[in-house]
Amino acid sequence: MKKQKTQADPGYTQVTRGRGNRPPKQTDSVQSQTELQVQGGFSPFFQMPMEMLCIVGFDGYFKAFSSAWQETLGWSAEELKAKPFLDFVHPQDRDKTRQITLQAKCEIRALPFENRYLCKDGSYRWLVWTSVPRPEEELIYAAAHDVSEHKEVEEVMRQSEARFRTVFESSTIGKCLTGVDGKLLVINDAFCQMLGYARSELMGKNFADLTHPEDLDISRECVRQLLEGERDRYQFEKRYLHKDGHVVCVDVGTYLLRGDKNRPLYFITDIQDISQRKQSEERVLHLNEVIRALRTPRE
């Protein structure tokens, strides 16, 4: 087995195979003839502005590949060509990759797919593939793009979302995500219990449906100031109406999450039930009034 790399086309590595590791002859096989065709006729393919380009034979071996393969995975050209390409694929991705290859052999154009390739240092890189089969030549032309960094960001976001959901759901204070139209999108159990509703009863309701009529103005002013960027966070006291009709006093802290181009996405709100504190304050006020009345001299 040997590598041929032309001076005119330094960006790709040509793989040739003979029987018993000797140079191939014209009579060796159709495979050898195909490899010579790759060497002579397809070098422009490897000059395309793509990251990882390759030609794979139906026998499962690389026929040619761009230098980005060595740079990305760390294997030498000799190491890449020594084994079937499936040996470099993550064990969990081999069945999917094998199925895509089988489709190519049946003249079915393979859709983009992802798999993981083994690096020489033992790590794996995520690759997104597009490929064009040429069954009449028993070849598959393929381009791969390394999306490992994107996958790492996705994983960090997934873990962050999982932590957020755990904190959100397990919190002892009410939490909700509310759309910019005022409708409840996500709520936790504490908020449901605070107002006496089942989760299914609250989902899709507008916050105004739950707010004491006398506190609607301050609630809407909060929404306005956040949407117009006058504040980053708004905290105030208001009253909700329990399902059975009694008043629930709460301390509300909310901020507006924005997306691309500063587009408003939804409000993230913490709701602390302060009904008992309010009742205690009212009792203290009443007691002070009684004491004041007792100390006032009677005429």
Image: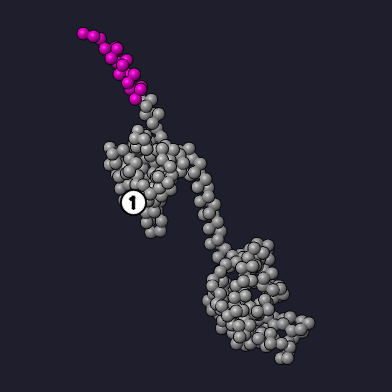
The one nearer the camera, 62 or 111, is 111
Is 298 included in the stretch rendered in magenta?
A: yes
Quadrant into which the N terminus falls: bottom right
**For the image shown, how many numbered marks are present on the structure?**
1
Return the residue nearer the eye: 7 or 291: 291
Q: Is residue 231 visible?
A: no
Q: Residue at x 60, y 79 (%)?
A: 106
Which image quarter: residue 83? bottom right
Q: Main secondary structure of the magenta part?
A: helix
Q: Is residue 259 magenta-colored? A: no
Residue 182 in percent (x, y) is at 34, 48
Colour scheme of the rendered structure: one colour
Horizontally, residue 2 falls left or right of residue 213, namely right
For disc 1, the neighbor class at 10 Å (few under 14, some 14 to 19, many from 20) is few
The percent position of residue 31, horizontal first and vertical second, equals: 69, 85
Element marked by disc 1: loop
Q: Is residue 137 left or right of 79 when viewed as pictured?
A: left
Q: Residue furthest bottom?
A: 26
Identify whether 118 is placed above or below 283.
below
In the image, residue 190 sits, relative to residue 64, either above or below, namely: above
Residue 91, position as x, y percentages in the image: 67, 64
Image vertical order of residue 83 relative to residue 160, above or below: below
Query: What is the quadrant of the C terminus in the image?
Result: top left
Q: Residue at x 53, y 47 (%)?
A: 163
Toward the top, the furthest residue is 299
- Relative to 77, say whether 169 is above or below: above
Query: Residue visible at 55% across and 77% down?
Result: 109
Query: Measuring 29% from the left and 12% from the top, which residue is drawn there?
Result: 294
Q: Which residues are magenta?
A: 282-299
Residue type (three-letter) at the residue carrying disc 1: Asp
Q: Which residue is identified by label 1?
A: 181
Query: 167 or 8: nearer the eye?
Result: 167
